[in-house]
Each structure stands twice: as C-alpha cells, then as structure tokens.
Image (tube, rainbow, N blue to C red):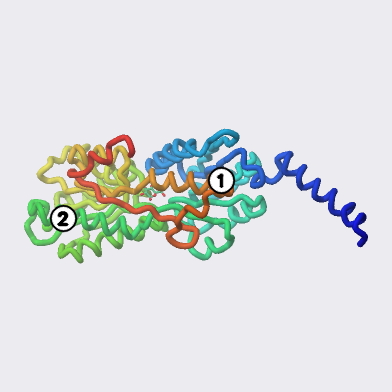
Amino acid sequence: MKKSSFWAAVFPAALGVLLLAGCGGPNRRIPNRIQVGVACYNQSDTFISELMDSFKHQLTAFEREGLTATVTLKDAAGLQRIQNDQVRELLDEGCNILCVNLVDRTDPSEIIDLARENDVSIIFFNREPVHEDMMQWSELYYVGADAQQSGVMQGELAAEAIHADPRIDRNRDGKIQYVVLEGEAGHQDAIIRTERVADTLKNEGIELEKLGSGVANWNRAQAENRMTQMIGQYHNQIELVLANNDDMALGAIDAYEKLNITETTCPVFFGIDGTSGGLQAVKEGKMAGTVYNDKEGQAGAMARLAAALVTGEGLEEISFDSERCIYLPYQKIDGENVQEFLGDKH
Ligand code: BGC
Ligand code: CA
C-alpha cells in the first residue's frame, strides 16, 4: 500500500474512535460517572438494608470533579425471575457496574449473560455464587464473609458463656439442650453456620443435646412462630437458642416475651450480624452475644471495587482473598465490647 493511501484508510478510522470516545460511547472509556445498578434479593431483610445504607453512603467518597456516583436499587422481593428482569432494566438505564445479591445463588447464568453482552462487570455480594459460576466470566467479583468463621465464633461465644455460668445448664444434667433457628435452606451462611457452631461447642468440651430446629428464612416474625411452636413442644427444657442471624434471635426472644416466660426459665440466645437491633439486645442483656458481620467493610469493599472497575483506577491496590473474591472478617461481640460497635462507625 502506498503511504498516502495507507493514511487515507487509517485516518478516518482513528478519527471515528476519537469521536466515539468524545460522544460518550462505551462507558469504560469515559469514566465521568459511576452508575451502580444494585439488585437485592429482598430489601425487607434487615442486614441487607443496613448494608445498602452503608454502601450508598460510602460510594459518595468516590465522587470528585468530573466524576459522579449514583446508585439505582431494585428489590426482587424473593423472586429470581423478577431479579433477572430488573438487571435487564438496570442495564437499559445505562448502569456501568452491577452489584448483585442473588435471590437464588445457584442460578446466576441469565444475569451473567446479560452483563457480558453489555460488557458490564458484576460484583456479587452476600449470597455467594458457586465456584463454577464465578468462572463463567473474568469480570465477575464477590464480596462477602467467610461463613465458617461466623459459625466458629458463635460457638466460641456460647462455650465461653456456658463455662462461665453453670446456671445455663438449668436442669443440671451436664448437657446443654438447644435448638437452632436456621436461615434459608441453600444459603451458604445457613448451612455452614449451623454445622460449625455445633462442632465448635463440642470441641470446646460442651456436651450437647439438640432438641429441634426450624427454618425461619432470616426473618424475625417467622422465627417467633417457629420458636413458639418449639416452646409448645419442649416447654422449659430449652437452655440455648442458636440463631443463624440476629433477626431470628430477636424473633425467638419475642416469642418468650409474648408468652411472659420469666428470666429464670429462659434460655440464652446467640445471633450473628450485629444489626442495630441485635447490638441493642446485647447491650440490654437480652441476647448473650452476636458475631459482627462487617457490613461497613463489605459495603466499603464493594464501593472501592465498583469505582475501580468503572474508572480503571486503583484496581491493583485492592487485595483479593482468592481469585476475584473479597471476604471481610467477622468479630465476636458480647456485653463486654458491644459499646464499641454501637459507636458512629457501625
Ligand atoms: C446475614 C443474614 C441475611 C442474609 C441474607 C446473611 O449473611 O447474616 O442476616 O439475612 O445474609 O442473604
Ligand atoms: Ca441441661
């Protein structure tokens, strides 16, 4: 090709690219806005709504001259089909990063396909897709926490309390009669927390007798119902209530309060999350302990990752625990340290 005809061919193409960039073509080339589309499995979930408040707040830290940050939040109210449609809408509305809290953590394929077609990265959070699904595309990330750790910590807290106070074994038979309130069947946190808390108690030398368990889907009212049924069945035999989250521990406490069961025949209650209601219950001594599910840390990691993926800046500074996954550590909370968590930061 002659020199002049080479430039005649290349120049218009190069100009086209520049014009496209100048007119706001593909988002990544002009990072003047971080437009986050968030799809939540259920906004009425206490932990998720507190996590979202923190996320919205922390994302504003990434705004600067010439860079805006907005969040559009959709609530699937527990239906995966609805969530798939909502992700489509978020992409149509121009979101350039997605944060997805799957309804069904085993069914992300449609959402992944939609994101890939639009070349928009996904940060999954709180409800962890299985490894094979995370491998479907290199633009998939996860922010959450290590479920094992929360179960172990809940077990350690309960063991400490039982060792410290022999009155917890109310019938003095050397065993702790307990019940479990479980989150949704199939959720990584429900399955693993339930297993690990009992293993840990046994490893700590506590003899256990499981009276029963009930699935209450992370929900306070459902937990109250399940607990009322179990009280009807086991009367004052229950010495310990292990709930997979704070809302369900609070629901169990509600059941005892509504039945006017006095403190001397009440079991001890343990939750997980450190929601504002959970922390308050620990402070008042109604709940013996909980495990902090670091919503500030998770929301902060999501905001940093979202900003980095959109702007292309700062990704190298983010450390991943395993490939494209970030797990924030849990912390034990009891009456001794609850005040630290009730401060401004949390
Ligand atoms: C939290 C629960 C919450 C659930 C929602 C868990 O990690 O501990 O409180 O309901 O996530 O997916
Ligand atoms: Ca006992």
- Left or right, residue 150 beside residue 157: right
- Residue 186 placement: quadrant: bottom left
Residue 34 in the image, given as x and y percentages of width and height: 57, 40
**Residue 216: image location, x then y, percent:** 34, 49
Question: How far across and down, in percent of the image, does residue 260 sit?
Answer: 17, 37
Q: Is any atom of residue 225 visible in this view? A: no
Residue picked out by circle 1: 82
Q: Secondary structure at mark 1?
A: helix
The residue tagged 2 is 160
**Residue visible at 43% across and 44% down in the picture:** 299
Q: Amino acid at mark 1?
A: Ile
- In the image, 285 versus 253, the foreground residue is 285
Which of the four quarters of the rendered structure image does ligand 2 lie in? bottom left
Which quadrant holds residue 155?
Answer: bottom left
Q: Residue at x 29, y 57 (%)?
A: 151
Disc 1 crowd rating (10 Å Cα; few below 14, some 14-19, many 20+) is some
Q: Quick one: label 1 or label 2, which is nearer the N terminus?
A: 1
Q: Name the quadrant of the N terminus.
A: bottom right
Q: Is residue 155 visible?
A: yes
Q: Secondary structure at mark 2?
A: helix
